[in-house]
Amino acid sequence: MKNGINGLVRIPRHVAIIMDGNGRWAKSRGLERIEGHAEGARAVRDAVETASRNGIQYLTLYAFSVANWARPRAEVEALMGLLVEFAQKERAELRQQGIRVNVIGTLEDLPTATRHAVEDLIRYTAEGDRMTLTLALSYGGRQDIVEAARSLAVRAKAGLVLPEEIDETFFHRHMTTHELPQVDLLIRTGGETRVSDFLLFESAYAELLFLPIMWPEFRPETLLAAIEAYGGKERRFGMISEQVQGLLPIQAFDPLDRIQS
Ligand code: IPE
Ligand code: IPE
Ligand code: MG
């Protein structure tokens, strides 16, 4: 990277990646889709290491969506097997790098062996304080929102939550993403320009980057270039440029003082 990432470039705190394109990568080489997933696991290793070395605090990877259960059984089984392999092979290295593994989605949906391997990985890396690596497993953004709403409804009915307490922060505490800050940079490989039910609530103001390369082609330089591109963006969160730069004050919305027509 031209400037090096050492304070000259603004680093996103939370990067989320939709790792798409494993199947097409394999097919275009005359390989089985599952070989694309195996190659994708290698790209994961590079992405994790590059993210943690460059000061990213949260890296969230879309590994398996709720919708992916509908794929052919052999592919799903192979993916579950690869997860076990990843958890067992990588745990020492992850712990050594100070990376803590976290999961969003429904871990209980996974086959027992996969769930145990992932739970072991979570326990084994629990002390890591350099970066949080979150794996989205049997994850769906809409499902996560709906389940939080349902659990709040149950608590409200029992008198444990007052409706007026429920604001965005409170709501987020009831989602499986409760440990994560909002997404700063959302990257999707594979050439599609959709979010496929990933982090719908948490990416409200994320910068989106869609890359034409397939996930197995993702390299450390790909992430560095993405971080650099992010550093050049002005995030206005609904305001105007002068306000973000501190040249004009930020107005607080006051319903009692709202503009009358
Ligand atoms: C993403 O790659 C990995 C998972 C969904 C697990 P795909 O398997 O979706 O690859 P393509 O999009 O078919 O090429
Ligand atoms: C998104 O990719 C899910 C993961 C990367 C785990 P998909 O390949 O499942 O998404 P669609 O079906 O193309 O939208
Ligand atoms: Mg895909």
Image: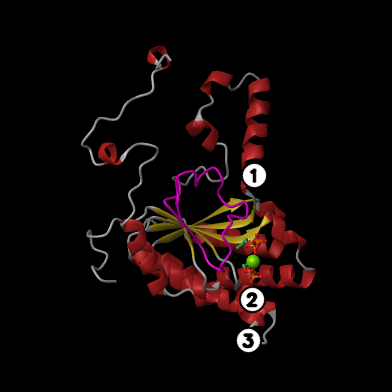
Can you identify the residue that label 2 sits on?
24
Can you identify the residue that label 1 sits on?
142
Left or right side of 166 for 184: left
Query: Which of the labelled discs sits on residue 43, or is there none?
Result: none
Can you identify the residue that label 3 sits on?
29
Q: Residue at x 24, y 42 (%)?
A: 245
- On the image, the x and y values in percent for residue 180 come to 47, 47
Q: Which residues are magenta?
A: 182-208
How many neighbours does mark 3 have within 10 angstroms: few (below 14), some (14-19), or many (20 or more)? few
- On the image, the x and y values in percent for residue 71 come to 75, 65
Q: Is mark 2 within 8 Å of ligand 1?
A: yes
First along the sequence among labels 2 and 3: 2
Q: CA separation, marks 3 and 1?
A: 35 Å
Q: Is residue 214 above or below residue 10?
A: below
Q: Quadrant of ligand 2?
A: bottom right
Foreground residue among 181 and 191: 191
Q: Is residue 241 above or below residue 44?
A: above
- On the image, the x and y values in percent for residue 140 come to 64, 50
Magenta span main SS: loop
Foreground residue among 41 and 158: 41
Q: Residue at x 68, y 21 (%)?
A: 157
Q: Is residue 110 visible?
A: no
